[in-house]
Image (tube, rainbow, N blue to C red):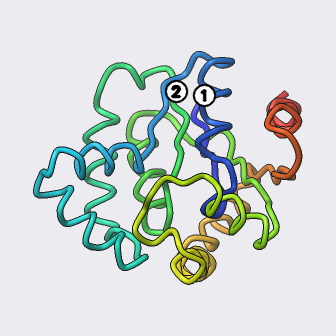
Amino acid sequence: MNIILFGAPGAGKGTQAEKLIEHLKLPHLSTGNIFRENIKANTPLGLKVKSIMDQGKLVPDETVVELVADELNHQIYDDGVIFDGFPRTVAQAEALDTYLQSRGKNVDAFITLSVPEEELIRRILSRGQGRSDDTREGIQTRLNVYHEETAPVLNHYNAKGIVKVIDGTGSIDEIFGRILQSLS
């Protein structure tokens, strides 16, 4: 089963991904984790990605798609994957669809976590991850980028009839219960 976890920054994708990984016994592919590993290791990709992220912008599609396709070639993903933070643009969604179709697979579920904007801002400010753009202004820039460039991905998968909108407010377990119910 191939599942995309989707939502604005601070919606709880990473938290819910961890619970889904444990429950479904599927590997997790987080572009954010891959980027953070490269940034921490000061790789050329990491330095490039850090510069882009420090401006609150999205990493270019071709860089992200290349990174994900390379990762998906590992055998661990043969039985399915939970995508977290990917795809973020329609071009990335189309590239993912093409990649999966070339292997006789597709996206089985697109789960989007719906959270009010003020709650997103509160969550990001309180989690203290130390990103240089974890300021009210930086978060607003990231949310604006999300609405302009990322939200159309929802329409892409909505046209395929696989979108499941989940109320992303409440306790972690309440949200997880809603996700599981949508998958059954």
The residue shown at (21%, 56%) is: 46
Residue reaching furthest to the left: 44
The residue shown at (55%, 40%) is: 106
Tell me if 181 is positioned left or right of 66 in this view: right
Say which residue label 2 marks. 80
Decide: few, some or many residues near mark 1? Use Cα within 10 Å; few <14, some 14-19, many ≥20. some
Q: Amino acid at mark 1?
A: Met
Compare residues 54 and 72 and report the one nearer the observer.
Answer: 54
Quadrant in which the C terminus is drawn: top right
Compare residues 46 and 97 and report the one nearer the observer.
Answer: 46
Give x and y (percent) for residue 142: 53, 75
Quadrant in which the N terminus is drawn: top right
The quarter of the displayed image where residue 72 is located: top left
Q: Measured along the vertical axis of the image, is residue 75 above or below residue 153?
A: above
Give the SS element for disc 2: loop
Sooner in the amino-acid sequence: mark 1 or mark 2: 1
Tell me if 134 is positioned left or right of 67 in this view: right
Give x and y (percent) for residue 69: 31, 44
Give the SS element for disc 1: loop
Give x and y (percent) for residue 60: 31, 70
Q: Which mark is residue 79?
A: none
CB-based contact (under 8 Å), mark 1 and mark 2:
yes
Give x and y (percent) for residue 94: 47, 61
Q: Measured along the vertical axis of the image, is residue 147 above or below residue 31?
A: below
Q: Which mark is residue 1?
A: 1
The residue shown at (33%, 44%) is: 34
